[in-house]
Image (cartoon, grey):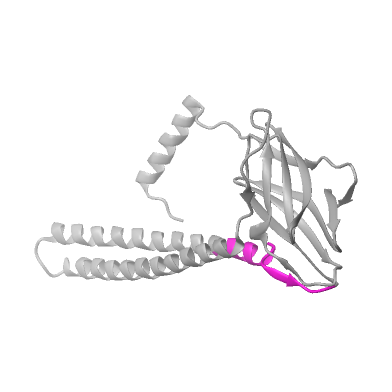
Amino acid sequence: MKINRLNVKLIILAILSCGLHSCFAPKAVIRLEPIDQNTKWVQGRAYVRDSINGISVSSAFARFSRPYLIFEFDIINNSNLPLLVDPCNIFYESHSSENTSSDKVYAINPEDKILELDLAISKLEASTKNNTVIGLVAAGAGAVAAVSTLSENNVEEKEAVANSSFTTSAIAFDSAEDSVEDMINSDNERYVWENSTIRKTTLETNESMRGRVYFQINESADYYTIYFPVDNQELKFVFNQKKYYP
């Protein structure tokens, strides 16, 4: 990404301002640990397991990426009936010393995120094309104005037009470049939501699946109880929340 002189000055002023006023303080790093001592460790993650009617579910805290808490789920259907796994039905209740419990917070729907990202990518594609066209047109106008100074009067005026056109062209191309970068980032994020999360799936008998579930975090919570519905009952997993400050 290209940066013009004005942007450089603004960045320098922002850095100086932050240095004088300490504008950012490091935020807490959050980790969750299962309260149940009957855990199974896999690659540094503590999995807790619960089961009912032939449905076995294991859960582990995967990572914290503000504003999300991310959990791994392993689900096995050893029952005689199909099991519909829908992440939208998984929820937690958080608990703290100030409040005994919170309202139910349901997992993020991956399909909503994928649609949101597809719409964003579509807009970025259009923005890239539009800015490229503007850049080409402005560059052409600048070239015409620059050449015309060789054979016409009002040289200063023509040079001003040429410089303005070239500046417009550079800004448009920089914007197109930024849009491409944003499009790549959005596409990478879409890949994560599409391929690493648990999405609505019917598990037949003796089938299993593994994936991640995302929740909005409650940073004031002391611990969470996560509920995984199975028919009219629920499997439960309790995690303690700890904060670490740099």
Residue 127 position, x and y percent, is 39, 65
Taking the image as shown, residue 235 lies to the left or right of residue 128, namely right
At horizontal 44% and vertical 65% (from top left) the residue drawn is: 124
Residue 85 percent coordinates (x, y): 71, 65
Identify the residue at horizontal 35%, vertical 68% (top origin). 130
Q: Is 226 above or below relative to 173?
A: above
Depth check: give the residue in front, 196 or 95. Answer: 95
Quick check: 50 left or right of 194?
A: right
Quarter assignment of residue 89: bottom right
The verdict on residue 238 being magenta is no
Q: Nearer the viewer, residue 29 or 72?
A: 72
127 relative position to 107: left or right: left
Range of residues picked out in magenta = 187-205
- Farthest residue, direction left: 153
x and y, in percent, of residue 246 in the image = 67, 31
> Would you say 42 lies left or right of 136 here?
right
